[in-house]
Image (cartoon, coloured by chain):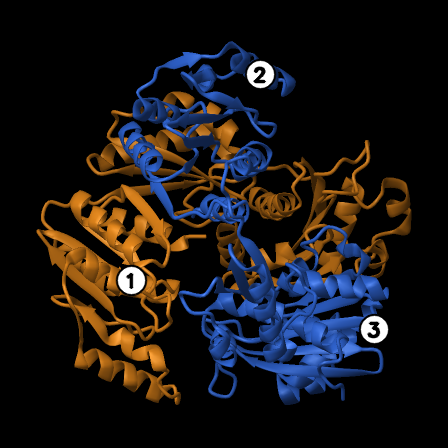
Chain colours: A orange, B blue
Amino acid sequence: VNTNAAFIGEKLGRVGVPVDEAVVVGDDTQQIAAAVGRGLQGFDVAVLTGGLGPTHDDVTVEGVALALKVKLEQRDEVWAAIEARYRHMDRTVPSGASRMALVPSGAEILENRWGTAPGLHLVKGGHHLFVLPGVPREMRGMLEDSVLPRLKRLPGLAPVHVRSIMTAGVPESTLSEKISDLIPGRDHAVRLAFLPGYGGVELRLTTQQDPAAMDRLAEQIGERIGSSLIRDAGDRDVVAYAGDLLRSRGETVATAESCTGGLLGKLLTDRAGSSDYYIGGVVAYSNRLKEGLLGVPATILARHGAVSAETAEAMATGAREQLGATYALSVTGIAGPGGGTPDKPVGMVYLGLAFPGGTSSRKLQLATDREQNRARAAYAAVDFLRRHMTGQISSK
Amino acid sequence: VNTNAAFIGEKLGRVGVPVDEAVVVGDDTQQIAAAVGRGLQGFDVAVLTGGLGPTHDDVTVEGVALALKVKLEQRDEVWAAIEARYRHMDRTVPSGASRMALVPSGAEILENRWGTAPGLHLVKGGHHLFVLPGVPREMRGMLEDSVLPRLKRLPGLAPVHVRSIMTAGVPESTLSEKISDLIPGRDHAVRLAFLPGYGGVELRLTTQQDPAAMDRLAEQIGERIGSSLIRDAGDRDVVAYAGDLLRSRGETVATAESCTGGLLGKLLTDRAGSSDYYIGGVVAYSNRLKEGLLGVPATILARHGAVSAETAEAMATGAREQLGATYALSVTGIAGPGGGTPDKPVGMVYLGLAFPGGTSSRKLQLATDREQNRARAAYAAVDFLRRHMTGQISSK
């Protein structure tokens, strides 16, 4: 799964070098050389990642030399840096490491502050080739450190302006219908992409020519979609937004989970600093624990079942009282793929919310995929809290 | 982030059609046509995904028609199926939907049981082009349903035999050193890939020519790496393996989490049927809850701190007793990026295990990345249980 390409595409676009094509080839000198040749011929800039390490299948540098018809030469300063790095780690230099000091003739060395293999910058006929390691952390660091500053110096760049409109709680198809007349056509200066994720759909507006038109369009879309819009979210998703809202009010949240098994707590603690507002939770996967740990009355479980609005609210109440938080969120449902009944099919989920002075619940009917259902339910729970905190749902 | 390419590569390789190249282009008719042309010229099989929907930027079919120099024609049976689908969903057919019934002349229709847009199969000069939706669930279903059966009928295929050696608890570099003399060279009939994940490193052996040599090599590697090998894992990772082990013994596990915030419970419940052995857990993100919910003595927290072997074992003991499980696993540590001290740096994590008759703990020193540290710690906790259950660590 190629996360490097997505990252590079995003970063290059923002400095005015939109990515037209991404290619993946195997660890094969000929295939790499062919791809490099095509990249240098058809594009102003080509960025290569991976295959710079010391093992037998790291052949990227050979492929580059073959494509550019230049020789490989050992660079003393690169070798010295490699030796120093292994010495620093208190390890002997492995036998293959000397290969990492082989560099195509004419290449400029790009320092790698995160790992061993250096990067390369080559120019041929005004076209730029950058060669970076494949390890995401090293690639990302070197892209920011060495590649983007060099690209910014290229003449005639029109940076891509980007505006994200973060939404939550409404599927892509509904959003698309709501704003169908606002979607810019192919010849418009502004482009609109729908980027759906479990946390909600991001509407991403981009333009190279007309940032003012983009801002106007963002306004119009925001007005149209109402409470699905996370106002002033910037690029924060619903979890980050709700977390910051809790922190700014000095409030806290606890969780009581059944079918999500801990995922809701995990989401709420993904960001550093979440202990400011998340105090903890209970995963009550069995009914016994819903009674024992959360104090859900046995009569509620018997009368309404574990997957019900009543149980969801009782779970939230129990968590709020026992853990001592401003709010408590609960999730109980049938994640699937098994366990459904005609009355309570797979994908039926109840969210519960306990707040100062009351409780509330919400029913979701999700699909059949377990992973998807769990993720959607957890994000929907956070959105339930966001809507409550921003006054968009009435309490009972 | 392209998950489709990885999935397609894996599936096609297994039926004997190894993937040499993956290309991503934008929603642009010309770019798509150029990529299709190159794909049909240079390769026996090309699989296209995405851009089959009803919106303005869905132009894949136009690109295919352009590349093959054929016309688009509306197919009545496709249009009827689209209408029926929307009727079934109780929705009116959106205005753009008729575009989904436009098909390049000569194409065979591939049924889409998961969504609206049909797939296509075209043959030109003995080269095969498959066009599938980009939605992963639809793409995966149709690949299995329609593409793989057609590919299997191609003459002269040498399926790729695959063997996975699942490991846990040892980093890639250590494994690589342990088996360095066993790693097959470039001219060997068997290839070996290291596929590191948070759950451990998968050593994947593949061969088209010599399955017997692959099996021998797998044996040798297994003997060499000892307890890091998950014996008889098949393609189960450490979480699935430990879950099945618990189920087969009729035993259960509970969790007590601090820095992982619920991730350990989430991992243990990723698979359907996990309620057979996972009963629940407590996320005690604050020290107050470590005392209140898990009964960790205040003296232990005061003397040793929340991140210590003593607290980890007390958390596990508390969870085991209060939740009533055979085993309890605990995680407490400094996930980062902030919160470290000279004594207890970022990445320091203690795992605790409570079992019938005792407790045990293990210290990890991870890195600086929060997401990585949390994932590694959660998987390491499961591996801690696996090693205990298979007699690979002594109890105290």
Residue A117 placement (x, y as % from top left): 30, 72
Q: Which residue is mark 1?
A: A60
Q: Residues within 10 Å of mark 1 (few under 14, many from 20)?
A: many
Question: What element does badge 2 sit on?
Answer: helix
Residue A54 placement (x, y as % from top left): 35, 73
**Nearer to us: label 2 or label 1:** 1
Three-letter residue code for mark 1: Thr
Can residue A285 be spotted in the picture? no
Tell me the subunit letter for badge 1.
A
Three-letter residue code for mark 2: Ala
Q: Are marks 2 and 1 on the same chain?
A: no
Residue B130 placement (x, y as % from top left): 45, 31
Q: Which residue is mark 2?
A: B81
Is B268 drawn above or below residue A334 in the view shown? below
Seen from the viewer's position, the closer of residues B362 and A198 is B362
Three-letter residue code for mark 3: Glu
| Relative horizontal placement of residue B228, taking residue A219 as reference (left or right) | right
**Nearer to us: label 3 or label 1:** 1
Q: Which residue is mark 3?
A: B321
Tell me the subunit letter for badge 3.
B
Q: Quadrant of the C terminus of chain B?
A: bottom right
Question: What element does badge 1 sit on?
Answer: helix
Can residue A19 be spotted in the picture? yes
Residue B56, quarter of picture: top left
Residue furthest to the top: B76
